[in-house]
Amino acid sequence: MDMENRKTWGSETWTRRLFGISVTANLILLTTLAGLLALLSNLGVQRASSIATTGWLKPIWFGLAVIGTPLALFLWLGMLWHCTFVYKTNGWLKAAWLSFLIVGNWVLTPLYYFLVYQRQTAVGRVARP
């Protein structure tokens, strides 16, 4: 694979669709985790541990672990790739986004997706601030 193809693979139709699915799954994952943590923290330790292992939560845990996590990881790695090789901007802004993505991991990756990646792919070119 030549360098130009490596730089533009994230702009292809199939990767844009997969990133869109991944960001949706990532937001569902974050919302579900935040809701469950808030619910369980309000119930107290004894009651929370009994509810966390009940049957109705097992499909949720399964979905989060088996489907949500790989999609969140794919989105995070894809946005890191995009920021490193495709995003053309001045040095300090690129360094700030890279730091943001590395420190924020998959939790903050949707911000980069909506603020940078989606704008660039919608225009079809690399946006310049």
Image (cartoon, grey):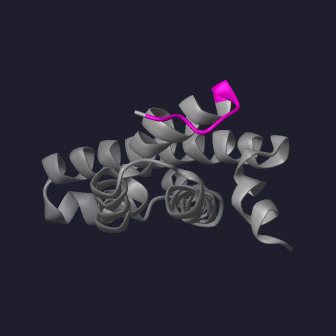
Compare residues 63 and 13 and report the one nearer the observer. 13
Residue found 76% across the figure and 69% down from its top: 3
Left or right: 4, with 32 as reference point = right
Residue found 55% across the figure and 41% down from its top: 117
Secondary structure mostly taken by the magenta-highlighted segment of the chain:
loop
Q: Which residue appears farthest toward the top when viewing the image?
A: 123
Q: Which residue appears farthest toward the front when viewing the image?
A: 90
Residue found 83% across the figure and 40% down from its top: 13
Find residue 91 and report its horizontal and vertical position in percent: 34, 58
| Res 25 → quadrant | top right
Compare residues 127 and 74 and report the one nearer the observer. 127
Q: In the picture shown, does residue 64 fall above or below 89?
A: below
Find residue 110 and report its horizontal and vertical position in percent: 45, 44
Residue found 42% across the figure and 65% down from its top: 53
Quadrant assignment for the N terminus: bottom right
Q: In the picture shown, does residue 74 fall above or below 16?
A: below
Residue 127 is covered by the magenta coloring:
yes
Q: Which segment is the magenta one?
A: 122-128
Quadrant assignment for the C terminus: top left
Q: In the picture shown, does residue 90 fall above or below 120?
A: below
Left or right: 27, with 25 as reference point = left
Find residue 90 and report its horizontal and vertical position in percent: 36, 50
